Amino acid sequence: MEAFDLYSPAIDANPFPYYDVLRERHPCYWSESGKLWILSRYHDIVQAARDWETFSSSQGNMIDELPGRAGATLGTTDPPRHDRLRALSQAAFARKNSEQLVAPTLEIADRALARICEQREFEFINDFSSQITVGLLFRTMGLPERDHAEIRRKVILAVSTDKSVKGRTAEHIAAFQELSAFLTAEVAARRAKPTDDLITHLAEAEIDGDRLSEREVVLTTATFVMAGVESLSSFMSMYALNLHDYPDARRRIVADPALIEPAIEESLRFNTSAQRFKRTVMREVALHGETLRVGDKVALAFGSGNRDWRKFPDPDVYAIDRRPQGHLGFGSGKHFCLGSQMARLVTAVAMRRFLERVPDYHLTVDEIAWNSSSNFRSPAALPFAID
């Protein structure tokens, strides 16, 4: 009997008991549903993430890859091309100071919280987290605000999977292609008329005469949009859910807001939205009695590594004093998240304001609906009410 079906609703809802089985009984596990190996122990995951010559990202890093991404984005290239893309992307980021995000984050949060506090019942993702992440993203990239809802819909579709077909459908692929077409037009507009935004900075980024190609600018922009719309919003939502599920921790943070930052790190360990990313085997590897052959696909289960007792004692305990060094919430190795500091800052600023205005809240449903994805784990909605 298969212990881990990548397309199981039960795993979307709670993968951690399944990860326990994998780590202790099948640390190198062949998943028939995904046609790939799953590495579930912390040490194995970190070693594979660092060994890009053996475990390559160049054939895609998503378990159900989208067309046109592999070999052309930060997450789907290996050195030396990856190093070039990362350096040029960092050069573009360097022109935007993360501290400049504090004031707009507070502005968007205050506007959202005014509505939330008036209504008393709210859906955290639509009414708060995505308001901030999508709003900030569009300002930083200079995208028109009228497209917020439509871009978010396309991103969520693009990173989702269909359980009935165990993969992506034409609708998912079309959403990514439409997003790419939208961003292609935006990049062309910046080429014609540069402005002070991240898309322009990516298009103009230069190191020793080297610049990103048009396709690289579009796909790098798409990566940032997908990360900002899905990953950051999902992480903020998971953080709010953790504080709901552990009210003693929430009350401690409300009493001492300095605990917000260490609680962010523990949430990234305890309940990261980035659960699994793919690699391709480039040379034969023997691991835990199994042979991984050239061309085999491997899923690095970051969410499982974060619950490995060999690295983190009492891993199933949510402890905001833990300060978990080396957690995998932002990945590991060459593909460690480029926007990690920005994500930490925005989440800390937004959640500090949220807890000032909404120190006590509760779910208004008995069960949460979860998005279907072979890579990510995030709630589809978090309906809360203010106590």
Image: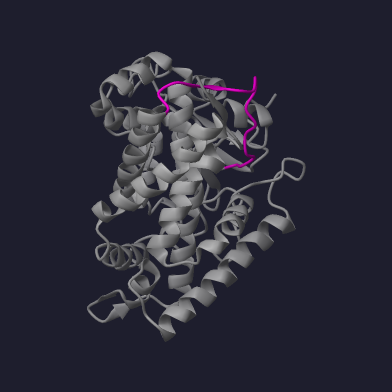
Can residue 72 be spotted in the picture? Answer: no
Q: Position of residue 102 (x, y in %)?
A: 29, 49
Q: Position of residue 7 (x, y in %)?
A: 67, 37
Left of 311 or right of it: where is 289? right
Single out the residue that lies furthest toward the front.
Answer: 118
On whether residue 365 falls in the magenta region, the answer is: yes
The answer to which quarter of the image holds residue 376 is: top right
What residue is drawn where x is 49% and y is 62%?
A: 222
Which image quarter is the N terminus in? top right
Can residue 56 be spotted in the picture? Answer: yes
Q: Position of residue 282 (x, y in %)?
A: 46, 54
On whether residue 184 falls in the magenta region, the answer is: no
Magenta-highlighted residues? 358-374
* Vertical relation: 312 (above or below) 134: above
Left of 225 or right of it: where is 172? right
* Image color mode: one colour
What residue is drawn where x is 36% and y is 62%?
A: 82
Name the residue nearer the viewer: 373 or 59: 373
- How many circles with numbers are drawn on the protein? 0
Q: Main secondary structure of the magenta part?
A: loop
